Image (cartoon, helix red, strand yellow):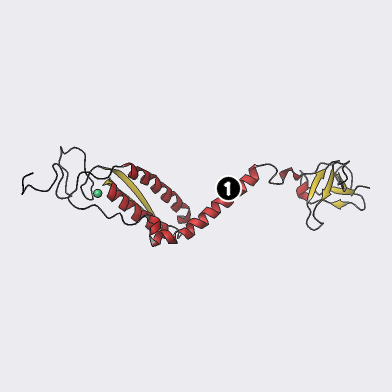
Amino acid sequence: MPHGHPQVPYGYPQTPYGYPQAAGPVGCQMCGAGPAAPVTVRGHQGMVVIMRSLKRQGMLCRTCALSVFREMQAETLVAGWWGPLSVLITPFVLLANLGALSGIRRLPAPVTPGWRPPLDPGKPVFQRPAGVLALIPLGLLGLLVTLVTGLLLVGLVPGLSGDDAHLKPGSCAVNDGDWTEQDLRSVPCDSVDAQFRVVDPEQEPCAKGDFLAEPRYSTEGIGLCLRPVR
Ligand SMILES: [Zn+2]
C-alpha cells in the first residue's frame, strides 16, 4: 500500500454529512463503521406528574448500538419509575430494549473502520451504579408479579381457593377452627369426625343449640345451620 494514500476506506465519507450514492452498504451514522443496521432504543423518564418518552433510532454499528442501548437502559432504570403511569410503562420499555439488544448482538462486530472511533460501550448495565440502584424497583416489581401470579393461580386452581369448601345441606361437617374463626370442612356422616349435620334454614329453621356457619360456606351466601350430631 503506497504511503500517503488517504486513510479513509473506499466508499465511506470522512464527515457525517451525506453518504456516497454507490458505496454499497451504509455505515454507522455515529462513526461510519460497517456493517450497520437500523436500531431503535427507547427510554422513559417519569417526573411524578409529567413524563417523557425517549427514542433513539438510526443506522448503527454493533459497538455504537451497544453504547446507545446501555446508556438508555441505565437511564431508564433510574429515571423510569417516578410516576403512577411511568411505573407501568417502564417495564415495557426495558423489555422492548432487551429485544433490541438481541438484535444488536446478532450484528457482526465492525469490520470496515469509520471516520471516527465508535462510541464507548462502557460497562454492562448492571455493572453501573444505575443498574445496581435499579435492583430495588426491579425487585419490588418481581415481587408484585409473583404475588399477582400466585393470586391468579389460587383463583384458578380449584381446591386452593376454598371455593370447594361449600357445605351441602344434609351432609356432615367438622370445625377445625373455633367459632370466632371457623374452619369447616365436609366429612362423611358415618365418619367419627362428623360433628354437625348441615341444615338449610330456608328448608328447616335452625333449632335451639344449632351453630351458624359463616355465609361463605353456603353456595347462596346464607348462614347454614350446623346441628350437633349426637
Ligand atoms: Zn458506530
Q: Position of 141 compared to 186: left or right?
A: left
Give the residue at x 34% y 44%. 105
- Note whether residue 130 is visible: yes
Q: In the depicted view, which residue is nearer to us: 68 or 55?
A: 68
Tell me the SS state at disc 1.
helix
Q: Where 205 sits versus 77, above or below?
A: above
Kindly give the residue lying farthest to the right in the view shown. Answer: 230
Point out residue 207 in the picture as x, y percentages from the top left corner: 92, 50
Could you say where residue 122 lies in the image, as x and y percent from the top left?
31, 56
Residue hosting label 1: 149
* Residue 44 in picture, x, y percent from top left: 39, 55
Q: Amino acid at mark 1?
A: Thr
Which is nearer the eye, 107 or 25? Answer: 107
Is residue 159 left or right of 29 when viewed as pictured? right
Q: Position of residue 68 (x, y in %)?
A: 31, 52
The residue at 75%/45% (across/down) is 165
The answer to whether mark 1 is within 8 Å of ligand 1 is no
